[in-house]
């Protein structure tokens, strides 16, 4: 008789492989089959994108899956995100505003060679008892509460496999989304191309200026995910553990039409115009260009994620994908897998998961929706170092203060806590969403007023203790009650930060008093808007002084020779 697996995972990429490990670690007896269409080991360097990780995703790989020894031995440590904004002479890197950490970071993250990683994850999950069939292309799934049937092609023959649970991790192929028709468009039309170059590329070598080189601790720039930004685009440079380098161009077609950079030859020409130093430093012989990939309009949403009735779920890019800026892809896989594995394990142990599945789905969809404004309509702002510095500060502050803190404290599967944080309109989680939205609207409204180019500045946002504290706070463990209290305290910090950022912007744009009262939930740059001038918060002098560090207009910054 045909074996029935507890779980069949469609697709053995990052999401599918990590899901299997997460399930096996919690319930080793679970029988899992992964069907993966790739028919051989993954190539190093030129396999997939998704190479840069940030705190949440790194925590998942290191602490939840227990991969720290592998990551430290075979992948690169990462030295944060580093940004170079435009100057009048982009050919000279020392003239650009640079934002990035200058010394070691205390919270770990990694640069991943996706081929090396997937091969290791495959080996690892097999050692836990997962069965993997490579060269198995899923054709169809017949979903049923009594057990689902998966039809797949392997070695030119049709096979079937039965599973109690189906997890769709087929990436952009999105087997279940297409079959069941829950595709949902995402109004964010940005595109990307990427390629891998043989060998190491160290940004530190891009200038011989000793003062520029000595700003960061020697060797650290190499380990950062480097972003070269200007209006409508960013270019990434990511080092890989295999000794190669990943390069990508990500651009808004309203500013940079896709057909101006969608072949290798065109992308080099595009770099000559927009990033002349990159064009010069990245020229390689043809055999040293390991691949070239394109993806037009990569963002997509989903109408559904988890189904308790017929026992299925989607994870990774088979669900929703927003944008690679700030490297959140692995973060979303981490949260997605944590919800899906929890549902599967509870169901397999006989628990009724109907309510849970509904709560996880609405939490997950709300999370994606609240993340959209980080990117939507923001690419045109990328030419402004002043706006982007404020925005990056804000985006990091919100990322660490609530979602990452909840994840590292294992709170996403705590129904009572989710209810307390998100159910009522005045709950902390809902206020978090509102505050974030007004701030993202502020950045857009500020855009037309802020075009100044600031040369020769260096800023390390971790010099601001208030931000550093939020980042370091994610490593602190709390009991549920204390966690809610901590989220409350973080919200108070975010409200103070939002008010102060607004005071600075409004003072510059409208000449309002720099010490005016502000209601953070009423922040608006519209002239004459009631922003709580009489009823809102007064400034916190220490925070105001700290945030002044980001104000290029008046502050004398570290100036390079
Ligand atoms: C331009 C760009 C840059 C990015 N950069 C980053 C980054 O720096 N950091 C980050 O964390 N994330 C990044 N991401 C996101 C990251 O790439 C994804 O989150 C991640 O690769 C998704 O993994 P996955 O397992 O869902 O999909 P995939 O890795 O695509 O895996 C899906 C698997 O399913 C298999 N498959 C497909 N169809 C079938 C079928 N019918 N039958 C069997 N198997 C099938 C495929 O062979 C594949 O192995 C980036 C994304 C883009 C578009």
Image (spheres, rainbow, N blue to C red):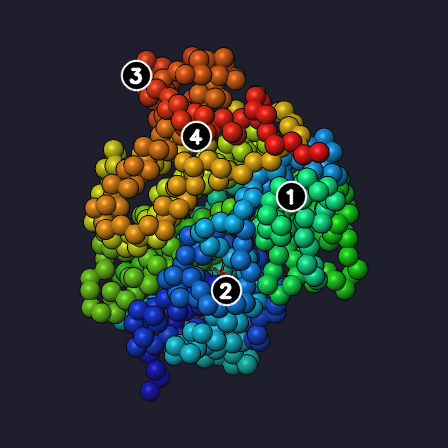
Q: How packed is label 3: few (under 14 Cα within 10 Å), some, or many (20 or more)?
A: few
Dividing the image into 4 quarters, which one contains the C terminus?
Answer: top right
Near-viewer residue (139 or 256): 256
43 in relation to 267, above or below: below
Query: Mark 1 highlights which residue?
Result: 214
- Residue 213 visible in rendering: yes
Residue under the point 65% across and 31% down = 559
Earlier-in-chain disc, 1 versus 3: 1
Q: How packed is label 2: few (under 14 Cα within 10 Å), some, or many (20 or more)?
A: few
Which dot marks residue 32? Answer: none
Identify the element where label 3 is drawn: loop
Which dot marks residue 439? Answer: 4
Nearer to us: label 2 or label 1 = 1
Residue 181 quadrant: bottom left
Circles 2 and 1: CB distance less than 8 Å?
A: no
Disc 4 from disc 1: Cα separation: 35 Å
79 in relation to 457, above or below: below
Residue under the point 49% across and 64% down = 71
Residue under the point 54% across and 63% down = 75
Earlier-in-chain disc, 4 versus 1: 1
Query: Mark 2 highlights which residue?
Result: 72
Nearer to us: label 3 or label 2 = 2
Identify the element where label 2 is drawn: helix
Nearer to us: label 4 or label 2 = 2
Disc 2 from disc 1: Cα separation: 26 Å
Disc 3 from disc 2: Cα separation: 52 Å
Query: Mark 3 highlights which residue?
Result: 535
Does mark 2's beta carbon lie closer than 8 Å to ligand 1? Answer: no
């Amino acid at each position: 008789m045909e074996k029935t697996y507890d779980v069949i995972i469609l697709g053995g990429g990052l999401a599918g492989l990590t899901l299997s490990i997460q399930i096996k670690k919690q319930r080793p007896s679970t029988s899992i089959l992964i069907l993966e269409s790739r028919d051989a080991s993954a190539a190093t360097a030129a396999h997939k994108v998704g190479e840069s990780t940030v705190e949440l995703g790194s925590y998942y790989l290191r602490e939840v899956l227990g991969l720290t020894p592998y990551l430290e031995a075979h992948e690169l440590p990462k030295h944060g995100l580093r940004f170079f904004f435009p100057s009048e002479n982009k050919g000279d890197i020392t003239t650009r505003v640079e934002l990035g950490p200058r010394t070691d970071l205390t919270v770990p993250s990694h640069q991943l060679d996706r081929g090396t990683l997937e091969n290791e994850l495959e080996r690892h999950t097999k050692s836990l008892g997962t069965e993997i069939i490579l060269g198995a292309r899923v054709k169809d799934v017949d979903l049923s509460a009594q057990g689902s049937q998966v039809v797949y092609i392997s070695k030119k023959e049709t096979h079937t496999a039965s599973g109690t649970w189906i997890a769709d991790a087929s990436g952009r192929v999105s087997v279940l989304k297409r079959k069941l028709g829950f595709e949902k468009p995402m109004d964010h039309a940005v595109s990307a191309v990427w390629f891998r170059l043989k060998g190491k590329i160290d940004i530190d070598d891009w200038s011989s200026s000793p003062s520029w080189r000595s700003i960061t601790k020697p060797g650290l720039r190499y380990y950062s995910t480097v972003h070269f930004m200007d209006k409508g685009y960013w270019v990434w440079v990511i080092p890989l553990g295999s000794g190669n380098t990943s390069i990508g161009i990500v651009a808004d077609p309203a500013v940079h039409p896709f057909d101006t950079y969608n072949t290798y030859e065109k992308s080099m020409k595009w770099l000559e115009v927009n990033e002349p130093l990159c064009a010069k430093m990245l020229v390689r012989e043809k055999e040293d260009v390991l691949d070239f990939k394109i993806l037009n309009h990569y963002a997509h949403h989903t109408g559904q994620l988890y189904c308790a009735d017929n026992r299925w779920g989607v994870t990774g890019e088979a669900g929703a994908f927003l944008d690679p800026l700030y490297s959140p892809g692995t973060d979303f896989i981490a949260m997605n897998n944590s919800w899906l594995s929890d549902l599967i394990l509870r169901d397999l142990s006989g628990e009724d998961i109907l309510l849970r599945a509904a709560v996880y789905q609405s939490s997950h969809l709300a999370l994606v929706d609240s993340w959209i404004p980080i990117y939507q309509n923001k690419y045109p702002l990328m030419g402004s170092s002043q706006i982007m510095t404020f925005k990056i500060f804000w985006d990091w502050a919100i990322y660490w203060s609530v979602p990452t803190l909840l994840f590292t404290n294992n709170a996403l599967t705590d129904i009572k806590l989710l209810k307390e944080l998100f159910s009522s309109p005045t709950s902390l989680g809902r206020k978090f969403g509102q505050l974030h939205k007004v701030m993202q609207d502020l950045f857009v409204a500020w855009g037309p007023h802020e075009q100044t180019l600031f040369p020769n500045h260096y800023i390390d946002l971790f010099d601001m203790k208030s931000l550093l504290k939020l980042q370091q706070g994610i490593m602190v463990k709390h009991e549920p009650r204390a966690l809610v209290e901590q989220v409350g305290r973080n919200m108070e910090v975010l409200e103070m930060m939002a008010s102060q950022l607004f005071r600075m912007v409004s003072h510059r744009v409208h000449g309002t008093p720099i010490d005016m009262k502000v209601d953070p939930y009423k922040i608006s740059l519209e002239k004459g808007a009631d922003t709580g001038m009489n009823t809102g918060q007064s400034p916190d002098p220490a925070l105001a002084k700290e945030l002044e560090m980001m104000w290029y207009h008046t502050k004398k910054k570290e100036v390079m020779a």
